[in-house]
Amino acid sequence: MNSNQYNQGLDKNQANYVPLSPLTFIKRAAYVYPEKTAVVYGVNRYTWKEVYDRACCLASALQIHGIREGDTVSIMGYNTHETYEAHFGIPMAGGVIHAINTRLDAQNIAFMMDHAQTKVLLTDTLAAPIMKKALSLVKEKPLVIDIIDANEETGESLGNMNYEDFISQGDPNFKWQLPSDEWNAIALNYTSGTTGNPKGVVYHHRGAYLNALGNLIAWEMPKHPVYLWTLPMFHCNGWCFTWALAAVGAKSVCLKQVKVATIYDLIEKEGVTHYCGAPIVHSLIANAPKELQVKKKHLIKGMVAGAPPSAAVLDTMAKKGFEITHVYGLTETYGPATICDWNDSWNKLPTAEQAEIKALQGVTLQVSEDLIVAHPETLEPVPFDGETMGEVLFRGNNTMKGYLKNRSENEKAFKGGWFHSGDLAVIHSNGYIQLKDRSKDIIISGGENISSIEIESAIFKHPAVMDAAVVAKPDKKWGEIPCAFVTLKEGMEVSQQELVDFVRSKIAHFKAPKTIVFGRLPKTSTGKTQKFVLRERARNME
Amino acid sequence: MNSNQYNQGLDKNQANYVPLSPLTFIKRAAYVYPEKTAVVYGVNRYTWKEVYDRACCLASALQIHGIREGDTVSIMGYNTHETYEAHFGIPMAGGVIHAINTRLDAQNIAFMMDHAQTKVLLTDTLAAPIMKKALSLVKEKPLVIDIIDANEETGESLGNMNYEDFISQGDPNFKWQLPSDEWNAIALNYTSGTTGNPKGVVYHHRGAYLNALGNLIAWEMPKHPVYLWTLPMFHCNGWCFTWALAAVGAKSVCLKQVKVATIYDLIEKEGVTHYCGAPIVHSLIANAPKELQVKKKHLIKGMVAGAPPSAAVLDTMAKKGFEITHVYGLTETYGPATICDWNDSWNKLPTAEQAEIKALQGVTLQVSEDLIVAHPETLEPVPFDGETMGEVLFRGNNTMKGYLKNRSENEKAFKGGWFHSGDLAVIHSNGYIQLKDRSKDIIISGGENISSIEIESAIFKHPAVMDAAVVAKPDKKWGEIPCAFVTLKEGMEVSQQELVDFVRSKIAHFKAPKTIVFGRLPKTSTGKTQKFVLRERARNME
């Protein structure tokens, strides 16, 4: 387009083009809100100036120890100020933060560190038993720095230096650089693959920056929110809230373990306004013992993802003064990519109907660009009929850079110019999507597709049910039949037959589970039910 | 960096890289909030679906009439729904929107249209007299489309078609494309240069997108605000709020002329929550006749730029339930680039001290990246002493793409990798900047730099003063001396000597004006005092 006058002599220069990076947020926070509290963890309280200085020290120390652009720094960290700082300090050194899921086993961790070519490992001594084993398995041993918790008894030190000594080698005035390119990697997050090796999802600075802003706008987050870290920071870098909170000068309230008494205590003491978590976190808060309650009344906003919140939980939460927003995303989309964007007019609907709507995964965030529900091969979008299932496909700047060193999975994931989520959904007449299943969780019975989520939703409506999951059980006659695993609320009872009848009164009879197994459900570290374990169990039933 | 594993096989593709553009905001608004009111102008009320469809029709019609990527479409429009739609419809066609300042003269307008190579002109018939003359002067006559106001008597039609007929040629399902590159131009805004020809400031899609999000976050704008268009849309595209409002599904309340009764009426009727404007707009609201008041009490947030709001106005506004935020920027920075980011702890200070702080131009927006106050040649930053003056230099993605076809000005503007604002400021110990003057407005008296703004602030403290401006007056002995032009409040009186004495009691004696002239001040279309006119007057005094 040589004739376009707007492209002549109007090139990028240092003054008008700066790579997008969430690192600018912490620089600004330290400058504008130096005295405001940034992170609280037990006895540890740091202002934005202090967190920034500590992050600079970490970056500086990492460079002293050889970290350069594109080097991986792994952290086995809980929700403490060290993990928070690392989200800035590591990329300030040019490094890529690999936050390890704290509930993984040693084999998996060793695989990831080898695959990521970890140069430095920061590790909380609470995880020493598992990390000691992981380190014995890795091919190339990284520099190991121990995080010593000032708030509780600590475990064995595995490295030669502790974190505080390490960062004290660094310079708080370290002249860190923005990434040379906004497409540079900032983080690596492994998906907990249920089959095969975990895949390393790579985030870039541009995406982290945009998803952070996207969260703030979609959730209408004001300046200086007080954010409770019920969501692990290792989970998509806390859905990018690690970075978003710096943009608005938030106070991060850390907690190492999700315990309901601690949650209520911190809400009260620190004036928590926002938190995120899997459904289990919200149930925990909703079903807390009566003596636990928020005395100072103020609106607390919770964000839930992983599964739709149940009507009962939503109702209880509303009465307790909590406002719950349902979002959906994957590790590959930097966490939340859709939101059940609430329409005021729905406030007039009966509570049950509101819950039905709130269960929808909704629409794109402002920064998510594009989403279709379509046939995974033809890319033909499904009609907006709330019936026809298709795969959820994403396109946008908060879709991952790709899987690290995994050409074949990248080709599959990005086929046809869309990111293939592997989630099956319908799209309602108002354009809101509703997940029906993971591709692999769908139950095919007598040639009919049955959504395991639809059955689970019906089961959840029974007042005695605390938790439920439905998987396919091989069947000679039907091919597959639905098999339900159910946890009942304490002190409540219901028979298998009663529950089957109840479900049949709610959905098509052929969809009702033939078998119901009562007991606790196996969970992943992020609170998701491990369906592959249940499928295995169902397969082995007589 | 061939060894960086994060740069291998992880390139941009259609799924993970989408050019940033505010056009995605209106697409989402139409999808998520189809029934919500988007724009109100008198009898005209449109939902987001309707505004989107109309913008698509406009884009489609423009393409039918030959508009392609990089073509200029000029609009002589007031704050009406047509001007709002054009901010989306023109770039959807690949065009660049050139919104003309409605108070310019025909010569200037003709110069701009020639310089911009305008292909299509949309023009409100209210401006017919001036535009008829401008069109008689342009070298290449564009296609002219008349905007006919449904709310008031209309003027002469200059084109062959009216706007409604024009867009009815278009297709509401028009398949518009995002820009091929986020660096493509989206808008052209001429600065009202006081000497020489106006310069055409070019905005790109990336900057418009980011500044829109930046406004929302810095101003903590929630979903569905009700925005009153007291700021002209032609002014930096309404400081990028044209686009920002689409991201949050706002309701735009349009008004063609800023009249205080209309403002109060619309606040009441439409439930206005936000508005922007030059200081004069806020004074107008503050000093409204007693019978005008907001009955339904709700917080109304106003944003002011152009000059610091006076303590008196701030005080009155606070009592009336308005919360004023002071921002600063230039056409070259897409409007607001800094904000007086308010610290809660300042709420405890006496009102007068709060006003002093609120008068500061403050700190960067979250998206503004970098700002220094420095020596314009050496780029040496000034100390944070609140005393030493330097030039405000910007660096960020919301710094213009450049001046259109103006190599020498671009070189000057971007010298040393910083955008040179031409504004002189000091930086306080807390890092907040305070403008002292335009480079050209500084008064050099007896070798001392005197800030005209400092003198004006002192004058403004006098209760009888409504408006004031200070310029340099040539003086044989001192080189220059300060000369003040003052407008008094209706029914109030103060003598020249009284006012000089008053100012001397506030600031260093040598800074007090030697001459004070009472009367109305000449204003630009955006409410700024035309200091060059006053300088001319001062020069010609006895």
Image (cartoon, coloured by chain):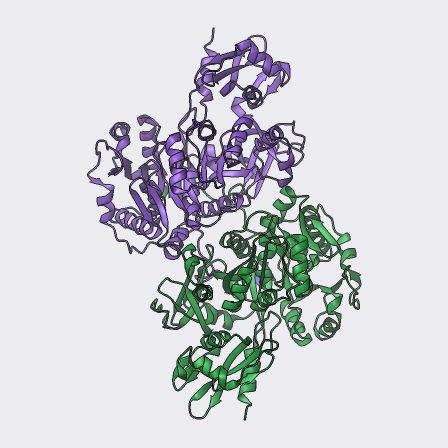
Chain colours: A green, B purple
Does the rendering let one see residue A68? no
Q: Vertical placement of B378 versus B499: above or below?
A: below
A352 and B491: which is toward the camera = A352
A277 and B372: which is toward the camera = A277
Q: For the view shown, which residue lies furthest in the top direction?
A: B542
Does the rendering let one see residue B153? yes
Q: Vertical placement of A211 versus B328: above or below?
A: below
What quarter of the picture does the N terminus of chain B occupy?
A: bottom right
Residue A471 lies left or right of residue A429; in this view the side is right
Residue at the spot 60% in from the left edge and 61% down from the top edge? A237
Residue A276 lies left or right of residue B266; in this view the side is right
A228 and A331: which is toward the camera = A228
In the rendered image, residue B319, in percent from the top left (x then y), is placed at 53, 33
Residue B47 lies left or right of residue A202; in this view the side is left
In the rendered image, residue B507, in percent from the top left (x then y), is placed at 63, 18
Q: Vertical placement of B406 versus B28: above or below?
A: above
Residue at the spot 31% in from the left edge and 51% down from the top edge? B50
Q: How many marks?
A: 0
